[in-house]
Amino acid sequence: MRTPKILPPLTIALIVALAGCHSQKAPPPIEQLSLSQAQEEYIRICKEEFGLDVKLFSLPNTLWIYLPLAEPYVLIQASATGPLKLPHASSTYVIKYLDGMFQPPDFLIQYDISPESKYIDDKGYSTKFTESFQKAQNNLFTALSRAYPQDKQIVDANGQPQKLPQFVVIVIADITTGIETKVLMDFDDYKRALRDAAFSEEYRKRVIVEQPVGFKAIIGDTYGIHLELHDLTLPEFLARQIAYRIEFQYQRSSFPPTEPPEETIRSIAATVLHYYDYRDFQTLKLLDLATGQEKIYTREELEEFAEK
């Protein structure tokens, strides 16, 4: 059975198109907006315009957005061709375990990605998200672009520029069956995607779109009590993005890797750290759980493997 895939914020293309209409006149003075006003505006847009009752949790570096939905949003649907089983095998790399973390001063990627024979054994059904879920997800991103507009400056009570959250975490929960999805992103990446259409493809790789998980504590939780709220750090976010990109390459790409997993993981990690210009670490450790072998690369050694 195929697991459902959360769609990236597809409304980005429309938003970018609108943002591209520039006036030839001198730009007006930047309007000021307080951080609390921006959050209140986000809640208002979601509630009044989209009928979404969101809860916000603001930490120093991370804005958590929680949307509880009363209707299940993961559906099982039959395929047009029905069940199919064939004795023809193809060899492909399969992720049996994958996790990325930052253990100061090092990044650690633990993995078991091994070749395996795969046979066609389709049960004739798959899972998908409801249209209402996809619409709600897109509306959350639309509201974010409007509540934190590019042409307004966020200030504190004294009119001084105020730091925006570095990260945004969006959690959409089915509080009837206890399923939730989570999206994590760097706010600067999101704002750049709004104004730079050429960045949209790379942006989709940087947004961490986690697959649904289940937990009974989610059932009936309209306030997000079950959430394990914490303030994301940049190295934690980068470690999770590295793991996400690896998973994407093997499980969702039209051209999954054929080279040894160590080479793929090393290249992805080096590229992510290069793109964010993150240098406050010493090594990248790759631990192959299947063999027990560990490979260690210094920060300087990684540079030669990064896509630039």
Image (spheres, grey):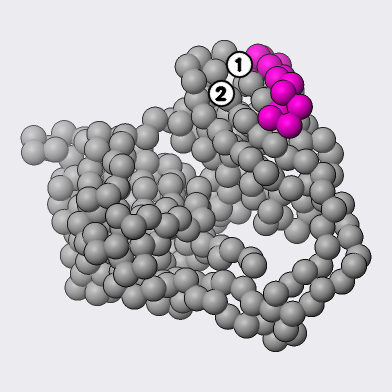
Residues marked 2 and 1 touching at CB (< 8 Å)? yes
Q: Residue at x 24, y 38 (%)?
A: 59
Q: Residue at x 82, y 48 (%)?
A: 116
Q: Residue at x 39, y 73 (%)?
A: 72
137 in the magenta segment: no
**Which residue occupies the extreme left position in the image?**
158
Say how many tags the image has: 2
Q: Earlier in the sequence, mark 2 or mark 1?
A: 2
**Which residue occupies the extreme right position in the image?**
88
Identify the disc placed on residue 20.
Answer: none
- In the image, is 255 to the left or to the right of 105? right
Amino acid type assigned to the residue bearing label 2 in the image: Phe
**Quadrant location, the C terminus:** top right
Q: Which residues are magenta?
A: 288-301
The residue labelled by disc 2 is: 107
The percent coordinates of residue 78 (x first, y second) are 62, 83
Picture layout, residue 175 above or below residue 167 = below
**In which image quadrant can residue 118 be found?**
bottom right
Q: Residue at x 40, y 62 (%)?
A: 179
In the rendered image, is residue 72 in sight?
Answer: yes
For the residue labelled by badge 2, is the local secondary structure a helix, a strand or a loop? strand
- In the image, is 272 to the left or to the right of 53? right
The residue labelled by disc 1 is: 283
Q: What whole-number distance in Å separates the C-alpha atoms at marks 2 and 1? A: 6 Å
Amino acid type assigned to the residue bearing label 1 in the image: Thr
299 in the magenta segment: yes
Picture layout, residue 136 above or below residue 187 = below
Query: Which is nearer the eye, 34 or 95?
Result: 95
For the residue labelled by badge 1, is the local secondary structure a helix, a strand or a loop? strand
